[in-house]
Amino acid sequence: MRRLRSQSWFGGLGKDAFIHRSWMKNNGLPDDAFDGRPVIGICNTFSELTPCHIHFRGLIEHVKAGILEAGGIPVQFPVFSCGESNLRPTAMLFRNLASMDVEEAIRGNPIDGVVLMAGCDKTTPSLLMGAASCDLPAIVVSGGPMLNGQYRGRTIGSGTDVWKLSEDVRAGKMSPEEFAAAESAMSRSPGHCMTMGTASTMASMVEALGMSLAYNAAYPAVDAHRNRLARHTGRRIVTMVHEDLRPSAILTKDAFINAIRVAGAIGGSTNAVIHLIAIAGRVGVPLTLDDWDEFGRDVPTILDLMPSGRFLMEDFCYAGGLPAVMKEIAPLLRPNARTVSGCTMGEQIAGAENFNRDVIRPVSNPLTAQGGLAVLRGNLAPNGAIIKPSAATPSLMVHRGQAVVFETIEDFKARIDDPALPITETSIMVLKNCGPKGYPGMAEVGNMALPKKLLEKGVRDLVRISDARMSGTAFGTVILHVAPEAAIGGPLALVKDGDWIEVNVPERTLNLVVSDEELTRRRQEWRPPEPAMKGGYQSLYVERVLQADRGADLDFLVGCRGHDVPRESH
Ligand code: FES
């Protein structure tokens, strides 16, 4: 057995080892807890302000039991919990901050491996980013999705039905009282959003990357299967420490290619693009928007889940979960990618079964033939923009329309329902200054609500373009992540009302039909917006955040810094 990292704290008879052991005995740890057995950190994102994680105090007990059964010592520690539903101005502003917390907590403490407990949209990438930058053995156990929402005899999905029902209220088809009643019907149990939003997508990405045990993505939060999975995860991390199986051996280019393929097959959230690029950056794997287009382009969406389709995560679980999806698209995958379970991905999915071909459709009868996320480029987005074709209107995939421009999100909210707003069903809505630096934090506001006057006429989709993100639960012909963003003078900043814009998704183009001379003239007049806050973390973020096409990480956090800390604390 090799000498474990924790022994550089706890081993020996000197003054420093006395200090480290003596204070840890406050936890009730006996002498033999320090005899060289693996010390496993449990990185816990429990918070009552992150309701998606409200069951983590119970789930963690199963992780601990598994660690103890395998001969390890479990030690849980809290980290910044980025809850999507409450944090202002947007949880994304704090993903990188949380990743710093995770990285430094892992590196600075006497642990040999770590279990990452995540669930809500930003907790999964922030934990993976931090752990990847340390490269100690790490494994994820996700919190799992909520049970299906049920409202007046019909199934409703987190987020997706919030957007739909609120548009019904604005169109006069639903009363505000009925809308309020849907609140309690939507969130019926602990767990994260049960649509294929960002949380479910990122749990699927974790599994597709090989960073969790099989079936991690789909078991509902309240299903005993998830407790058992947590227990097996606790056992497995102890063995991983003995094997020295670290993220750098699992998070390879093949693993990211598998994840991109799976994102297309499940109709995953557009946010996965940014998060996977950021995670890859932490382990030094070159991953670009072009990889997303190349490896996602021909992947059919076969999972019929909201927002692209009809069903929800509970149905996905009963249909066979992610291994069943991966087996359906097995010819597209890199089977030799390693997983935390110790076997290859090909071996992991070999025995998977599909129990419901309405939910997990065969490749021969997909929901969308070309389900991957499309990357658009042109003079409006020289460094790229993305769209999710499976959630868009097919007839708008090739479209030419005149811009209706909103300079800020406040400008949009103030004018969208103005009866005098010159907007028709062929217009293209353009929103500026909502990117990484502009918002700041690149909020999920890109799926702008449609104007009331068009909703009342029955219009349900328009082309919308912004440097923002959108919720993974949202839908529509929404072009996002335009880079460079408007707040640093990207071409988006130069668009004016009435400009013609051409979108061609099959040809992957996005162009502003304005002459170069006119754009040069407008650029000379352009002035950057005032920062939303001076000082504090926001200033650091705005100064150092990378653009969307590079994962919106902070530039100084990119890369793996390892887990060595040679200098003692006393
Ligand atoms: Fe937490 Fe949707 S708000 S997963």
Image: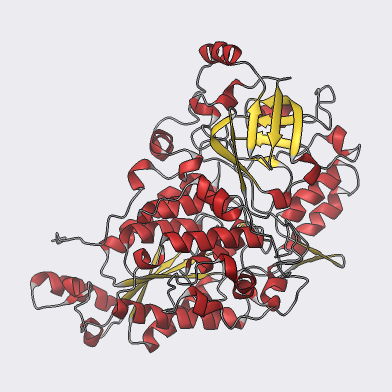
* Res. 329 image quadrant: bottom right
Q: Nearer the viewer, residue 107 or 245?
A: 245
| Residue 48 can be seen in this image | no
User: If the image is split into quadrants, where does the N terminus sit?
Assistant: bottom left
Q: Quadrant of ligand 1?
A: bottom right
Q: Nearer the viewer, residue 191 or 250?
A: 250
How many marks are shown on the rendered structure?
0
**Residue plotted at (51% across, 32% down):** 484
Q: Is residue 96 left or right of residue 183?
A: left
* Res. 8 image quadrant: bottom left
**Residue plotted at (11% across, 78% down):** 12
Q: Nearer the viewer, residue 6 or 18?
A: 6
Q: How is the image coloured?
A: secondary structure
Q: Is residue 200 left or right of residue 336?
A: right
Percent position of residue 219, x then y? 62, 75
Percent position of residue 498, x then y? 74, 19
Percent position of residue 347, x then y? 50, 80
| Residue 135 can be seen in this image | yes
Q: Is residue 343 above or below residue 389?
A: below
Q: Is residue 23 left or right of residue 349?
A: left
**Residue plotted at (64% across, 28% down):** 511
* Res. 245 image quadrant: bottom left
Percent position of residue 233, x then y? 45, 78
**Residue plotted at (32% across, 63% down):** 135
User: If the image is split into quadrants, where does the C terminus sit?
Assistant: bottom left
Q: Is residue 172 above or below residue 356?
A: above
